[in-house]
Each structure stands twice: as C-alpha cells, then as structure tokens.
Amino acid sequence: MDTLDLIFEKISSYHRIIIHRHVRPDLDAYGSQMGLAKWIRFNFPDKEVYCVGENDDTLSYLATMDVIEDQSYSDALVIICDTANSPRIDDQRYATGKEIIKIDHHPIVEQYGELNWVDTEASSTCEMIYMFISHAANLGSEMTTEVARLLYAGIVGDTGRFLYPNTTAKTFAIASKLVKYPFDRTEIYQNMYNLELPLAKLKGYLLNQLSIDEAGVCTVKLTKEILNEYQVTVDQTSALVHIYGDIKDINCWAMFVEEDEQIRVRIRSKQVKINEVAEQFNGGGHPLASGATVYSWDEADQLTLALKRVCQSE
C-alpha cells in the first residue's frame, strides 16, 4: 500500500481528526490545514474534524481555528501540515494524539510521527493536498469549491503568484484545475496585497531605511516603539516582507520584528539559500524564504553576520 493509500486509510478509520500547522502561519499553512479539514468534513460528515493553532487576523478571510479540550487528543488522529520540525508545530498538544501523520514540502529537518509524506519537489503543501484529494477521488471522494479556494490560496502564496522557482508545470496544471471552481480569485489577491493606510505608511518608512551592505544583505529592525508609532501589529508586518525583492543589488534581506519576549525574523533571498541560517536561530523554512526567532538585538546582529557570510560564500 502506498503512502497516499495509507493516509486515506487512517483518515477513514478514525472518528476524531485534529489538524495542526506551523506557528506564524502563512497562506500555505492555513490553506493546507483548512483545505484538508473541509475535504474530510464534506466526504466524512460523521467525523469530528478540528483545526487548531493561534488565529492570525491577517488570514481570517480564509478561516478561523477551533478551540478544543486536551482530552480530545486521547483517541485522535493528528495530521500536521506544512511543518518541517516539531518545535515549530503550533500547539504542542499534538504529541498526545494516538497517531501522527506529517504532510510537508520543506527540506527534511526532522521526521516525526508514525507516517511521513514529504515531497520537496511540490511547490506547496496545498499542492500536495490536491494530489492526495485527486488520488482519493478514485476511491469515491469529492472536491468542493471551498476546498479549491483554500488550496489555490496556499499555492498562490507559496509561489509568490507563480513567480518563484518552485512553480512547475505540475503547479500550473493543478492551478488550472482549481480555478474551474467558482470561487472569487480577486478576493484572495486583494486580501493578500491590499494595504491599509498604517501599513502603507510603514512601507514608506521601510523604504526610507533601506541600506545594503557589500554582500548585498539588507536588514531592518522594527522595534515595539516603531510598531506603536505606525499602529501596526506584528502579524500585519508580514504583508511587507517582500518589499525589498525588486530592488537591484539586494541578495537577501531580513526583517526583525520585536515582540514582548522575542524578536521575530522573516528572511528572504533571491538566489542564495538561507534556510540553514534560519535553522541556526530557532527557525527554518524554504531555501529562499524562511523564518527564525532571536531573543536580543545582539543575537539579531549575529544572524545578520551569518547571512552576510552565506552571501559572500556564493
């Protein structure tokens, strides 16, 4: 029995299924988690299916998370989407589930759970969920418009509207099948890229702070004071992470965003692989798009030096 058949068998055999994804979710995390959940709910209406993790206001147009009790895990199948290593799983109660399945497209950092399906050639975990649903269709299941909307949003997010190198002919083929369903693509794009006035003003600040070192590294520090001044939340700053991507001479960039007890780091690159740097600083992700966490501005400077070394070695 191949992996997709095994996943289908596990989903079929459990009454309660709890689906997780990574902390600080993006479109692919939300889309794969909720897309899979809604597919299960539609095709297995008698099952209990929950999605857990912190809600992200910037992604509320896609879905909101469920709140469940600890005891719900005792006899549940746990499926974790779009998460390379266990410390980045949002809601660590996942470990108390009866069985765990990992579905992910990131480079393998850690294998966890009883069943792992990792496809690093896939553009996104949403692309993988579509592949699973297509496989399950041979067993009598169906796709819905809402599932198609969620999976399309995740694919668009992780491919940067089909601009990134992870976009393949297979990705375009899957997208072409998803858009046959009558969901509102314009709404997805508007929610992804429209900026409210406070964010637009912060964007101006970020461009005004632009500085590129000799290695082509650009960094910006958003302290709590700056966020308060512009009336922008930590989560909202994710909408500006690609702001330096079109600027000549920048090889990679990092946005440091101060929270109460830590500093969130969003790292992006045009060609140089930066995910190993992120892994050194409590994070991980894709070769050209990763996240990390540091706990002081001195540690933030150390991360910047690591990025510089990587760029200079290329």
Image (cartoon, helix red, strand yellow):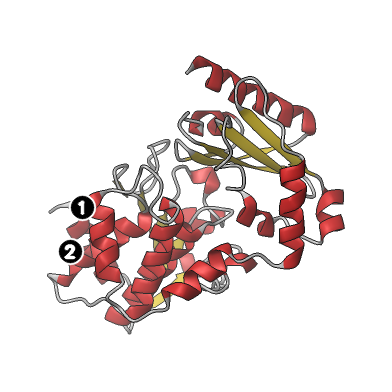
Q: Nearer the viewer, residue 306 or 201?
A: 201
Residue that extends furthest to the top in the rendered view of this protein:
313
Residue linked to disc 2: 135
Camera-side residue of 115 and 295: 295
Q: Examine the image and state in which quarter residue 235 appears.
A: bottom right
**Residue tagged by mark 1?**
3
Q: Nearer the viewer, mark 1 or mark 2?
A: 2
User: Residue 147: in sight, yes or no?
Assistant: yes
Q: Secondary structure at mark 2?
A: helix
Q: Residue at x 49, y 35 (%)?
A: 270
Alpha-carbon neighbours of circle 2 within 10 Å: few (<14), some, or many (≥20)?
some
Please tell me whether residue 314 is drawn above or below residue 243 in the rendered image: above
Q: Quadrant of residue 154?
A: bottom left
Q: Badge 1 local density, few (<14 within 10 Å), some, or many (20+)?
A: few
What amino acid does circle 1 point to? Thr
Residue drawn at (69%, 24%) of the image: 302
Q: Look at label 2 and name its amino acid.
A: His
Q: Position of residue 304 (x, y in %)?
A: 66, 27
SS for tag 1? helix
- Which residue of the protein is positioned furthest toward the bottom in this rendering? 45
- Using residue 275 as the reference point, say whether residue 182 is left or right of it: left
* 45 vs 40: above or below: below
Identify the image quadrant of residue 97: bottom left
Picture disc at residue 238 = none
First of labels 1, 2 by sequence position: 1
Along the line of sight, which residue is nearer the eye, 269 or 104?
A: 269
| Image spot of residue 228 (x, y percent) | 85, 57
Place of residue 256 in the rendered image (x, y in percent of width and height, measured from the top left): 70, 41
Which residue sits at x=43%, y=69%?
34
Classify the position of the N terminus by image quarter. bottom left
Q: Position of residue 35 (x, y in %)?
A: 38, 69
